[in-house]
Image (cartoon, helix red, strand yellow):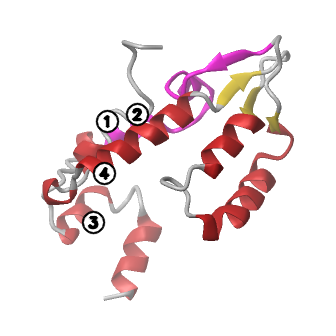
Amino acid sequence: MRGESSALEGVADLVPPEHVSDELRSSIDKLSEHLDGLLFLDHTAELAVDRSAFLALCRDEQLLPAEIRDIFILETAKYCGRRLKEFETKGRRLRWREAEKYGLVGHAGVDELAERGYKPTMSQEDIEAAIGDWYPTWCRARRSNT
């Protein structure tokens, strides 16, 4: 897997430079490792989530605070349904980027933000103008909170 693009490559570049720290980069790298071990194609070529890898991610307190772990597990399990299962020996592991072929949003989202003109140094108003049609709910919530 080395030498290939990580699951979250470029994400730190979306954060305003004054907020990027070694701790943030470490958390992004750690999350990226978890994401790259999370998915597989089962014996029917259906995308699935490895239950053991998912629970390992959930136990990582740097990424998921203990006080929200149970609700996170419950809600994610409800969302994944039957696709949350133990890795099958006849299955094929997928890196996060590979899973984009099966409908997951990954690095394409980072690229699309750049194409829409997003820059980490933009003001909130400029961000809204650049990506508001892509995230209308966020824009409405932001306006109602100001």
- 50 sits to left or right of 66: right
Task: Report the Cα–Cα distance between label 3 and label 1.
Answer: 17 Å
Query: Which residue is identified by label 1?
Result: 111
Confirm or deny contact between disc 1 and disc 2 (CB under 8 A): yes
* Kind of residue sitting beneath label 4: Glu
| Residue in the foreground of this view, choosing between 146 and 57 | 57
Q: Residues within 10 Å of mark 3 (few under 14, many from 20)?
A: many
Residue at x-position 54% and y-position 56%: 61
Name the N-terminal-most of marks 3 and 2: 2
- Please name which of the two marks, 4 or 1, marks the residue nearer to the observer: 4
Residue at x-position 48% and y-position 54%: 62
Label 3 residue SS: helix
| Residue in the foreground of this view, choosing between 75 and 99 | 75
Q: What mark, if any, has residue 107 been given in the picture?
A: 2
Label 1 residue SS: helix
**Residues rendered magenta in the picture:** 91-113
Q: Is residue 16 magenta?
A: no
Task: Report the Cα–Cα distance between label 4 and label 3.
Answer: 28 Å
Name the N-terminal-most of marks 4 and 3: 4
Query: Which residue is identified by label 4?
Result: 23
